Image (cartoon, rainbow, N blue to C red):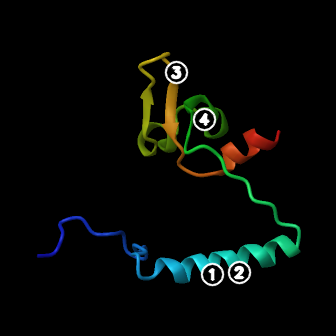
Amino acid sequence: MMSKFQSIKGFYDVLPELTPLWQKLESTATKVLHQYGYRNIRMPVVESTDLFVRSVGEHTDIVEKEMYSWTDALNGDRLTLRPEGTAGCVRAVV
């Protein structure tokens, strides 16, 4: 039986049998990139909602329709599942 939910066109699951191949590809690419001065950065998957509101505007389709946001029950902070990495990367290095 085919699942009701399928991956988006052009996106694929990497299942266990192919994971070693992808890990080798990623490892090789990382080594080459490091030779040219590339340094990796990893930002949190969850950021303050204000970070995205400030970068794209409060009343935009991105903020109003395309972001998954919620209020942290512990401290009342507005949090957002990071929709892309630009704002978080800038926050991390500025």
Residue 25, disc? 1
Camera-nearest residue between 62 and 28:
28
Question: Callout 1: helix, strand or loop?
Answer: helix
Give how far across and how far down residue 76 sits, in percent. Answer: 48, 17
What secondary structure is marked by label 2? helix
Dividing the picture into quadrants, the one containing residue 48 is: top right
Q: Along the polypeptide, which appears first: circle 1 or circle 4?
A: 1
- Disc 3/disc 2 C-alpha distance (Å): 40 Å
Q: Is residue 69 above or below residue 8?
A: above
**Label 3 vs 2, first from the N-terminus:** 2
Residue 28 is marked as: 2
Task: Please name the residue shown 80% across and 74% down the image.
Answer: 33
Q: CA distance from mark 1 to mark 4?
A: 38 Å
Q: Disc 4 to disc 3, how far (Cα)?
A: 18 Å
Q: What residue is at 18 percent from the left and 69 percent from the top?
A: 3
Q: How far apart are the alpha carbons under marks 2 and 1?
A: 5 Å
Find out whether the residues at labels 2 and 1 contact each other: C-beta distance under 8 Å.
yes
What's the amino acid at mark 2?
Thr
Q: Label 3: which residue? A: 77
Tell me if 11 is positioned left or right of 35 in this view.
left
Query: In terms of depth relative to the viewer, which is nearer, 27 or 58?
Result: 27
Amino acid bearing label 1: Leu
Residue type, label 3: Asp
